[in-house]
Amino acid sequence: MNSLPLRSVYLSGRWTAPHSVRTIAVENPATGQVFAEVPDCGGEDVRRAVDAARSALPGWSSTGPAERIAALSALRDALAKHQDELAWTVTREMGSPITFSRRVQLGLPVKVLDGFVDALLAATADDQVGHSLVVREPVGVVGAITPWNYPLHQAVAKIGAALAAGCTLVLKPSEVAPLSAYALTELIDGIGLPPGVFNLVPGRGSTAGAALAAHDGVDLVSFTGSLEAGRQIGAAAARTVKRTCLELGGKSATLVLSDADLATAVADGVRSALHNAGQTCSARARLLVPRQRLDEALDLAGSVVAGYVPGDPEDSACALGPLVSAQQRERVLGLLARAAAGGARRVAGPDPAVRPPHAGHFVTPSVWTDVDPDSELAREEVFGPVLAVMAFDDDADAVSLANRSEYGLAATVWSADTDRAVSVARRLRVGQVDVNDASFNAAAPFGGYKQSGVGRELGRHGIQEFQEVKSVQLPG
């Protein structure tokens, strides 16, 4: 890819000057240095983008599966071809270690697109219910608002579902990490989509995001981000009674049942909590272990955490990069200070407030115990390299403890007995449960219960979120 047109917006199939003259600085979180700027768009640029998407809707919505599969396959191949360049972009804009960026930040979007293609290939014809023909049709224009922690994956998940469903869309990436969206747009520009099917408008959530959610030409808003921002998106969308698909984070848990291999399960729980410096919506930041094995689990967790040393994310040996911003670092440290004041005890890791010998927004990883189940540390999303270890008495107590959160996104259950693990999984109020070391399935539905959001992403279920259902009653 050539140098990115970072002073432009992408409307109707071409790069063009934005209406707004304001810009947003993009910082490398590992150094704290600004290294790029993008337009700070507002309502007028959003209006232009929505107009372009609405103009393209009749043509794209009338395409068949073959044309949509061709577009998704071309985008998948382009991502795979430019995987390394894109991984470096993600690392520099939001701080993921380069090995993690290559394996997850880029590896996952390729699998997501494969899942959409497979879903279209397996799709059946219209359904027949008695004398009624039941058809699925594109919902219309999608407003896609994506976060900074998995900037490329989240964009691809929304773009892929929209294209597969026959929708047109406007993408508003996070103002914190917008560069990968520009790189992705360059690839989309090369796959031959009709003008206006895809449009890119950068900007702040409070301006461009709010305008997109409120626009009466947008039929569905798909948003991934914080709970508070999701509430605002939902309120704005409600004014025009548009549909929303909201993924709003979680407080996920690893449940280690009494018959599990403790060392393996604890290591898995620690890795989940520390991936991407803990900045993952489905991070399992709570480790629930049998009470009689709590001390052993704490020792094991401390040993694993010791291997996560903050470092330069551009170094292939780095396992733990920085937090995305100074604001995020202060938020995490403030939560931990309140946890300590409330009686929680740090049992592994140095004082998180002590900066490692690096510039940037680093926080050292830590393990905590004596955590009150009703405390902020036990119930709220930290979004930092922090693990709370808590004890339970039996399976029922473990389920109760895991469900004791306003969130319900994900969990993992470890047991030597798969049937026992599945029984526990069925009682968890979360959208996705892994049993033992099960791998992530990019074609399975992803989303949460409770305040983790509404709707599902990925695969067939993700496409259906972007469709309407119509019944056509036929004469007898």
Image: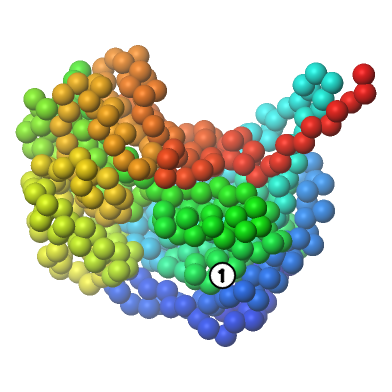
Q: Note whether 178 is above or below 63 in the view shown.
A: below
Crowd class of label 1 (few under 14; some 14 to 19; many from 20; radius 10 Å) = many
Residue, x 82% and y 27% (percent of image)?
Answer: 133
Looking at the picture, does residue 365 appear above or below residue 420? below
Figure quadrant of residue 314: bottom left
* Location of the N terminus (image quadrant): bottom right
Query: Foreground residue, 470 or 100?
Result: 470
Residue 374 image position (x, y, % from top left): 22, 43
Q: Which residue is mark 1?
A: 208
- 25 left or right of 283? right
Question: Which image quadrant: the C terminus?
Answer: top right
Report the coloring of the rendering: rainbow
Position of residue 451 measured from the top left corner of the image (x, y, whole percent): 42, 45
Residue 380 point in image, percent of width and height = 29, 49
Residue type, mark 1 in image = Ala
Which residue is painted at 42% across and 44% down in the image?
A: 452
- Where does residue 212 sit, x and y in percent of width and height? 61, 64
Q: Looking at this view, is 475 or 170 the one in front?
A: 475
Q: Quadrant of residue 165?
A: top right
Residue in front for this viewpoint, 85 or 276: 276
Number of on-image labels: 1
Q: Is residue 25 visible?
A: yes
Q: Quadrant of residue 431?
A: top left
Callout 1: helix, strand or loop? Answer: helix
Give me the residue at 17% from left, 28% from top: 392
Front-most of residues 285 and 154:
285
